[in-house]
């Protein structure tokens, strides 16, 4: 009886993906996000489902705000449902506002590389599609050079068993995701995706980066 239940449970987990958890009623935000502030800087990363990306970077010391959203596509003001089709060209990503006197872009990149698999093309676990691609959307030439440097260094070092497929391209647009996506992990601790996908990622992050946590 235990074996049958165990197999059924594992089978159920294999189908858990970010795209399956859609709200029936959505408060759509069509505001294009802009950021100002002399003391802060901005980074934009895509590591698969933005719920995971958000949950990790929110816990990093020096990070002041994390906004889940969409970037890299050609459709203005896309909705979550549109992005999930893979037809808009956008990636689920997070815009990260941080204090560079506390945490550097180099350190953000370290967290980026170590908290997802940058070798799987358009896929993170059971989340499959171009919207789940690995990407660094750079805001400056300095960010571009650093991202490309570390990507090349990691490939050369053999840190991963397969070549890194992370896309490095300029931020051309960033659209904030619907309100129910913001702070998703903190607001939905009982959600199956949160419990079985995000919690292990966050726990691993907290062990590896324990000296950098808020």
Image (cartoon, rainbow, N blue to C red):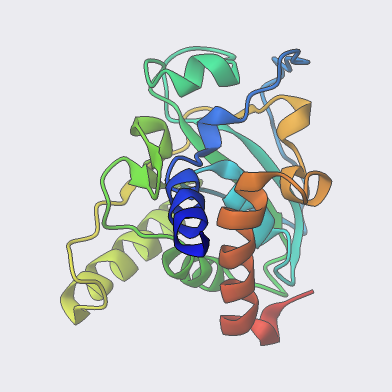
Q: Residue at x 41, y 52 (%)?
A: 141
List the single residue furthest toward the front: 1
Tell me the quadrant of the picture where the C terminus can be found: bottom right
Residue sitting at x 37%, y 15%? 87
The answer to which of 112 and 1 lies nearer the viewer is 1
Locate residue 56: give its quadrant.
bottom right
Percent across and percent down for residue 35 are: 72, 39
Q: Is residue 205 left or right of residue 74?
A: right
Residue 101: give x, y in percent of width and height: 71, 73
Residue at point 71% right, 14% down? Answer: 24
Residue 41 appears in the figure:
no
Answer above or below: position of 4 versus 26.
below
**Is 167 or 147 nearer to us in this picture?**
167
Q: Quadrant of residue 156?
A: bottom left
Residue 69 vs 26, above or below: the answer is below
* Residue, far right: 187
Q: Decide which of 54, 30 is in the foreground and name it.
A: 54
Q: Residue 205 appears at what percent x and percent y?
A: 59, 73
Residue positioned 59% across, 14% down in the render: 77
Give whichever of 194, 178 is nearer the camera: 194
84 w.r.t. 43: above or below: above
Would you say residue 201 is visible in this rendering?
Answer: yes
């Amino acid at each position: 009886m235990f074996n049958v239940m165990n197999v059924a449970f594992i089978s159920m987990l294999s189908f858990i993906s970010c795209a399956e958890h859609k709200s029936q009623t959505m408060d759509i935000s069509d505001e294009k996000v802009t950021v100002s502030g002399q003391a802060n800087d901005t980074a934009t990363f895509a590591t698969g489902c933005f719920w995971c990306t958000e949950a990790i970077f929110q816990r990093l010391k020096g990070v002041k705000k994390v906004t889940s959203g969409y970037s890299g596509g050609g459709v203005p003001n896309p909705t979550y449902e549109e992005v999930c089709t893979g037809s808009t060209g956008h990636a689920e990503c997070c815009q990260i506002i941080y204090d560079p006197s506390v945490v550097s872009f180099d350190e953000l990149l370290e967290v980026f590389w170590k908290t997802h698999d940058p070798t799987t093309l358009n896929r993170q676990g059971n989340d499959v599609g171009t919207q789940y691609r690995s990407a660094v959307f750079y805001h400056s030439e300095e960010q571009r050079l650093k991202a490309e440097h570390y990507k090349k260094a990691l490939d050369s070092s053999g840190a991963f068993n397969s070549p890194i497929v992370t896309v490095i391209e300029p931020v051309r647009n960033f659209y904030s995701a619907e309100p129910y996506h913001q702070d998703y992990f903190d607001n939905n601790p009982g959600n199956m995706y949160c419990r079985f996908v995000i919690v292990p990622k966050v726990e691993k992050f907290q062990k590896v980066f324990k000296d950098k946590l808020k």
